[in-house]
Image (cartoon, rainbow, N blue to C red):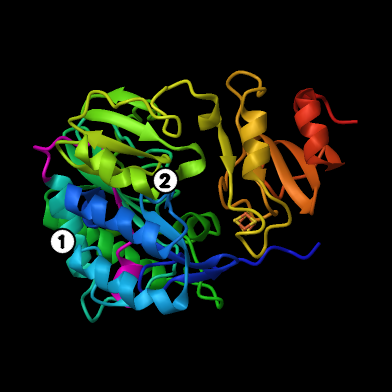
Amino acid sequence: MSAPQIKGWCPGALRPMASGDGLVVRVRPPLGRLNAVQAHGLGEAAQRLGTDVLEMTTRANLQIRGVANASLPELHARLRDLDLLDSSPELEAKRNIILNPFRNAQDLHHEAIAAALTKGLSAPDMPALPGKFGFLIDVAPGHRHLSGISADIRIESSGEGFIVRADGADTGRLSTSVADAVEIALQMARWFITSGGVGADGRGRMRNHLAHGAQLPADLVGDAHPSPAAPKAKPGLVAHGLCVAAAFGQLPATHLGWLADHAPGGVALTPYRMVLLRGATRLPDTTDLITDPDAAVMNVYACTGAPGCPQGLAPTRDLARQLATSLPSGKTLHVSGCAKGCAHPGKADLTLTATGQDQFDLIQNGRADGRPIRCGLTAAQLIQNPEILSQEGP
Ligand code: SF4
């Protein structure tokens, strides 16, 4: 088995990524929201030019798969008309910003910080950042809603104000205003580059940089703790509307416009494989969308796998779907098409990593590249005997 290939960058709309089923085109809606016109237009574009599915990513973006090279100009034109296309691939790559989707309509700090940060990142003297390097804005007073979400520079609420915190540091520097917070964040990004955070392969993350001994300069260090984390978001009713999930983040493209029609305040994208329909209280019954907070499939992660991903050694999602209902209560399951573990980079209670066309390693309390306790399990074996998942290793 060859080692999985690490690309070190995320696809965009202007810089799509080739995959086994065509181009992957990732759309990064400004401020993490879509109005009804954008939602209908994006859904139609995916139906016409992609595989009829919109993937909800862990960076609160939507991606279209299976786009032919020849269809890209038409897709770009449609996205441009919808105000969903950046002016350049460079800006698109830098504008890697996740906003708290559960913010109040009155809380304009998120938008103000995102706008100023985007402007600063697009300045000619701002150096390029590694492809996966990103920012997060989570400044609603009281609680953080994105505490478990990966981002290298975090602008978060803290007491009565907000802080800028390098990922991997426990505390951050208190900022006095939106402009001050953005300036600190941009300084931190520059420091990351000048202090050697980017490797020879062009990759680099803040958490690793600090873990390897890099010391933030005194003017970027602070002693303010971020606000406590809010409970993890689930499908169902929340303060600002209705959270609607789709298994494995695979949203049928036909549904996006329809969902927006039920969201008077627009559609907010979350990094939790679901969208928030702002102002919605209920949705007509559908079989392929999830509003039940206890839906078993929400504890299951599965990547594209074979044949859609060229690195996929086996199909993943059918197996994951079939195992979801027999999963021990409260346990998480990750079915990965190879050891790269794209769908769930962290640990899961149970992980099945494909090692061949119909061969899986079982890893308990680990990542997709962790040490297996069982090898060579087939999909049929697992479906017929799901208790294998909970057994102790030999
Ligand atoms: S983890 Fe899945 S999606 Fe990622 S490279 Fe492997 S097979 Fe492809």
Alpha carbon of mark 1 to alpha carbon of mark 2: how far?
Answer: 34 Å
Figure quadrant of the C terminus? top right
* Residue sitting at x 84%, y 38%: 374
Q: What residue type is labelled 1?
A: Ala
Say whether residue 190 is visible.
no
Q: Is residue 215 left or right of residue 90?
A: right
Q: Quadrant of residue 123?
A: bottom left
Q: In this view, which residue lies farthest toward the top?
A: 329
Q: Where is residue 36 in the image (x, y as percent from the top left)?
A: 19, 47
The amino acid on which the numbered mark 2 sits, given as a three-letter code, is: Pro
Query: Can residue 274 be spotted in the picture?
Result: yes
CB at mark 2 closer than 8 A to ligand 1? Answer: no
Return the mark for residue 116.
1
- Residue under pointer 2: 252
The residue segment tinted magenta is 90-108
Does 106 appear in magenta? yes
Of residue 116 and residue 282, the one placed in the foreground of this image is: 282
Left or right, 290 with respect to 106, comes to right
Compared across the picture, whether 293 is left or right of 31 comes to right
Identify the image quadrant of residue 346.
top right
Residue pictured at 50% horizontal, 75% vertical: 202
**How many marks do you count on the picture?**
2
Seen at 50% across and 31% down, the residue is 298
Q: Which residue lies furthest to the bottom in this view?
A: 124
Q: Residue at x 32, y 35 (%)?
A: 145
Residue 205 position, x and y percent, is 48, 61
Q: Is residue 374 magenta?
A: no
The answer to which of marks 1 and 2 sits earlier in the sequence is 1
